């Protein structure tokens, strides 16, 4: 009987709850719903033909190796390619600093497993990526949250929080999920100095870094870390572990991401990964290497940028046209998401149900806060990568109906509006 | 500096050590070495052409879905196919009882995460699968070991051990890794009764069940559990969680395995898997479904059985011809491994190095024991699936040289021989 199992669940699992996002992904599958809920890439930009050629080539030339067990560290040519690619962003790393993971979610899980003892505090942004909260919470993490504005984490508030002695900082500097904001160059330098000053390392999560639609590239934290050095005999890495992925540039269905870290951190992570899933699909690593090589990845990212920029602009335009003036939103310079702020007192969960009645979906802000004191309930995360421009326009129109009704309903009880931390652009 | 990281490693990681097997896989890559070390399937039996057709079909017909994010539970048609396939073995399950995992190693990791609090005892076989020890040890498991003989775990000894209150039993009933032995039908019934009597559930790991080369199929534990019932409104599962994989029947490089469990256990595992890697590669699940469907998997397993039976026989014959009479070995009726027992006092690690000097490799027995009191040092695990018959013959000849030298070297100091628990056949 299954009660036999229930009584045996380990302590760590008792706090693990179903994620709102999982439920939302089910909603996105109803064809009549225009969904801004998931974080799905546009299937129209999947390089299906290139995948087809790559699969054929891999099976014809390397079938016996590509279908066999592989090393835990990952397919060596892929690790080398990643090390070469990130050198362009000033990250000095060897293939030995790169561990291939089964998606970024596994990277977060392995980092949680490596670093978090029950009760350890992690410093992170409010709001922050839900998947990181899920991964870290399994290991009993507590959180110290620092708010963000259009320029990312408010680093002026980090100093005080670091004195509380968090185990590490978890930061999404580029086009952050969920808020779509980007950490400014000045704040990046400040954060690196603080990491050094307090001896508290940084986990830098950068799934969207290549998907910039305007403005200049800003160096990642790992490249600003003065301990990341190029030397005669190779490279060293220091206070920053850097994560990125092929999920947004090739396809999420192949579950391929990577961790860049000092070699002794990698060797520990390798042991944990070995116990967790032995290694990431050899076949997918061979295929991704064949897809990405010879400059294809760079060319393809250009296409994605073009498509997503158009969708972002469609959403910004529609918001401007349809949404009431007391609602504001971020102006993401890249990535997949923007973040809407409604007047204080708005109940985004009620709004979610009202929106669903109009056949449009989003993610309510609450689930992106580590210490949910209700700050999230006036926010919603909107994804603009998955729907085509005309659907975005229609979806925002539908959503505006729900928003206006919602705002009218509570207008007589509304508390005075505080200025939003996000400018409307 | 990386010391910053080192000082921050979580307690759970401190005991995690590099596995001998990882080092050994590197040895297997030296072309002059005949390796009986890994647990590698024969690449000659990978259905490369069928994979090629499947990839093309999946990309042509389902590219947008197969490259996209998927549900954590797994690709529904694949779950349904697995539920149908295991019904032949008397396992009554719906697709909802099946969770797709990124290889069996992830199944073991998720089960460890779900069930093990630091210090919990797990009852398992001595020797047992190294990967399970690695997965469970991350969560602080302690072990209660029960020896095996040709008929598997000595269930007569289980009763006493169960009184020590282990969290669960971990058992490999078919062609066990590493010993190659199979739990007899009588002992299976006995184990199920004991699980019921003490209310201690079983995790049944069955990666090799379909690879039987002689004798009759024996029902898995999960099918003998009287709580696994077919009812009007579906099925129920009870005290046994069942694991299996495509790694030995299709290919390990696609990292696809599954857990069969009661629905509320599955729903807990889904939450943990979501935090661990979101989901298993959608693409690989679509491809495996296309490869396996329309009876191909069954046909292909027949071919594998034929190839591996021949290799097993080649190894048994060569052992008989070359090995000295004081050495014994198991006669596996299926699977990938056999287990050699040398006279007491043999040092299998010294033997390993002597063998390597002869360009032949195996895994020394020690690493397969949860509580290593030196029982393993007179054993070696030999894999017979990966090398062709003529190489097996040559490898065993080389190995016999090392064994004979080793036995001669210690003959004057040898302790009286105890009868081996394994019969020589």
Image (cartoon, coloured by chain):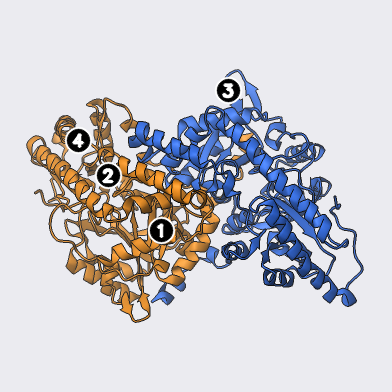
Chain colours: A blue, B orange
The answer for which chain carries disc 4 is B
Q: Are marks 4 and 3 in contact (CB under 8 Å)?
A: no
Q: Residue at x 31, y 77 (%)?
A: B230
Q: Is residue A34 above or below residue A337?
A: below
Q: Residue at x 90, y 62 (%)?
A: A418
Q: Which residue is mark 4?
A: B388
Outermost residue on the bottom side: it is B232
Disc 3 or disc 2, which is closer to the eye?
3
Which marked residue is nearer to the observer: mark 1 or mark 3?
Answer: 3
- The residue singled out by tag 3 in the image is A234
Q: Chain of mark 2?
A: B
Q: CA distance from mark 2 to mark 4?
A: 23 Å
As drawn, A148 above or below A292: below
Task: Report which quarter residue B109 is drawn in.
Answer: bottom left
Counting residues from the start of the chain, the first of labels 2 and 4 encountered is 2
In space, the residues marked 4 and 1 are separated at their CA atoms by 39 Å
Q: Secondary structure at mark 1?
A: strand
Q: Earlier in the sequence, mark 4 or mark 1?
A: 1
- What chain does badge 3 belong to? A
| Residue shown at the point (61%, 45%) measured from the top left | B8
* Labels 3, 2: one chain: no
Q: Which residue is mark 2?
A: B365
Local packing at callout 4 (Cα closer than 10 Å; few below 14, some 14-19, many 20+) is some
């Amino acid at each position: 009987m299954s009660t036999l199992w229930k009584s045996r669940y380990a302590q760590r699992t008792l706090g693990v709850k179903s994620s709102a996002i999982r439920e939302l992904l089910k909603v996105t599958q109803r064809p009549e719903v225009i969904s801004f809920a998931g974080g799905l890439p546009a299937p129209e930009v999947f390089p299906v033909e290139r995948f087809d050629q790559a699969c054929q080539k891999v099976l014809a030339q390397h079938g016996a190796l590509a279908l066999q067990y592989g090393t835990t560290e990952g397919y060596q040519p892929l690790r080398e390619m990643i090390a070469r690619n990130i050198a362009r962003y000033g990250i000095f790393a060897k293939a030995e600093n790169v561990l291939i993971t089964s998606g970024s979610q596994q990277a977060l899980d392995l980092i949680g497993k490596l670093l978090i003892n029950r009760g350890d505090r992690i410093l992170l942004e409010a709001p922050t990526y839900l998947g990181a909260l899920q991964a870290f919470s399994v290991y009993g993490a507590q959180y110290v949250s620092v708010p963000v504005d259009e320029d990312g984490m408010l680093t002026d508030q980090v100093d005080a929080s670091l004195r509380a002695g968090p185990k590490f900082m978890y930061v999404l500097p580029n086009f952050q999920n969920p808020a779509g904001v980007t950490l400014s160059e000045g704040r990046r330098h400040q954060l690196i100095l603080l990491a050094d000053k307090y001896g508290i390392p940084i986990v830098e999560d950068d799934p969207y870094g290549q998907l910039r639609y305007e403005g200049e590239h800003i160096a990642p934290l790992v490249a600003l870390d003065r301990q990341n050095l190029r030397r005669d005999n190779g490279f060293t890495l220091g206070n920053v572990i850097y994560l990125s992925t092929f999920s947004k540039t090739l396809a999420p269905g192949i579950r391929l991401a990577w961790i860049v870290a000092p070699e002794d951190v990698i060797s520990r992570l390798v042991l944990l990964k070995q116990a967790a899933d032995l290694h990431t699909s050899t076949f997918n690593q061979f295929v991704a290497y064949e897809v990405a090589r010879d400059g294809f990845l760079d060319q393809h990212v250009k296409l994605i940028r073009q498509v997503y920029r158009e969708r972002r602009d469609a959403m910004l335009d529609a918001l401007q046209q349809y949404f009431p003036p007391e609602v504001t939103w971020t102006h993401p310079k890249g990535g997949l998401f923007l973040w809407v702020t409604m007047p204080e007192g708005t109940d985004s969960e009620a709004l979610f149900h009202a929106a669903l009645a109009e056949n449009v979906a989003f993610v309510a802000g609450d689930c992106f806060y580590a210490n949910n004191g209700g700050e999230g309930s006036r926010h919603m995360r909107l994804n603009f990568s998955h729907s085509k421009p005309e659907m975005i326009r229609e979806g925002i129109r539908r959503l505006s109906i729900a928003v206006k009704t919602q705002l009218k309903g509570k207008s007589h009880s509304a508390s005075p509006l505080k200025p939003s931390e996000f400018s409307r652009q």
